[in-house]
Image (cartoon, grey):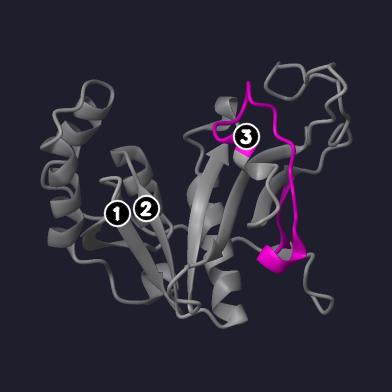
Amino acid sequence: MMEYTLLGWPPDDPTLRLDHRQFAYAGKFVMSNTGKAVVRSTGEDAGRVGDETSGGQTAARDDVEYDTDVMAAVAFNADRNDERMLRLRYITVRSDLKGQGFGPRLAAFVASAADRRGYDRVAIAVNNPFAYEAMYKAGFEWTGHESGLAELVLERRAGARGDAGVRPDPETYRAGFERYRNRDLGDPEASFLADRVGADPPASVDVPDGSDSADPDA
């Protein structure tokens, strides 16, 4: 079993210690200047530090107590120039669980919580076509802009509820993929992009139920 939990918003200084052998960007989650949300395993072995995880990997025994029950995590904070916009800074999924939809569902979970907190929109900048597709599944859409690091910037408006709202524009979706094709990427990205020629945006995932540990009324 699993649960989606918002650990805290940026003023709450939440931190995570993720095993760098299992998670990309693990070091970013030790920093306390961003809010955090996670997908956690709730099985009877969840949270046992130093034991094998469900993926057959072993947490380090070097006096670092990793959060071994975490399956996916996201870090976020308000935009530096627009406090009404929340930015997802890093999304990471445990290496043996990639491709199972945890990233899009976690992003949709945080975006829904941001709606309730009063943010107008949620944004993320992505540097590869896999993340681009995943964020479309989370209800985001490409803005037509790139960051200074040549990442494509996607946004999800407040109140967006996937298929219940307006469907994303197919031409905008395809134009984003065309930006990646122009970068002459190798496999597996090139094969993925070839499969998306002329494709329509994917269906949005449902926003999962979860808890907000920073909300005393949750």
- The answer to if 12 sits in the magenta stretch is yes
Q: Report crowding for label 3: few under 14, some 14 to 19, many 20 or more residues within 10 A (C-alpha).
A: some
Q: Nearer the viewer, mark 1 or mark 2?
A: 1
Q: Please tell me which of labels 3 and 2 falls first in the chain.
A: 3
Above or below residue 82? Residue 136 is above
Q: Position of residue 76 (x, y in %)?
A: 56, 58
Residue 188: image tag = none
Q: Residue at x 15, y 52 (%)?
A: 174
Whether residue 9 is visible, yes or no, is: no
Gap between marks 1 and 2 measured at Cα: 7 Å
Q: Position of residue 37 (x, y in %)?
A: 66, 55
Q: Which residue is mark 2?
A: 125
- The answer to if 15 sits in the magenta stretch is yes
Q: Position of residue 186 (x, y in %)?
A: 21, 21
Above or below residue 58? Residue 122 is below
Q: Nearer the viewer, mark 1 or mark 3?
A: 1
Gap between marks 3 and 2 measured at Cα: 18 Å
Q: Secondary structure at mark 3?
A: helix
Q: Report crowding for label 1: few under 14, some 14 to 19, many 20 or more residues within 10 A (C-alpha).
A: few
Gap between marks 1 and 3 measured at Cα: 22 Å
Above or below residue 163? Residue 152 is above
Q: Quadrant of the C terminus?
A: bottom right
Q: Secondary structure at mark 2?
A: strand
Q: Please tell me which of labels 1 and 3 falls first in the chain.
A: 3
Q: Residue at x 88, y 22 (%)?
A: 63
Q: Which residue is mark 3?
A: 26
**Amino acid bearing label 3:** Ala
Whether residue 169 is visible, yes or no, is: yes
**Is the residue under label 2 in contact with that under label 1 (CB below 8 Å)?**
yes
The segment highlighted magenta reads 1-27
Q: For this view, does 175 lie left or right of residue 135?
A: left
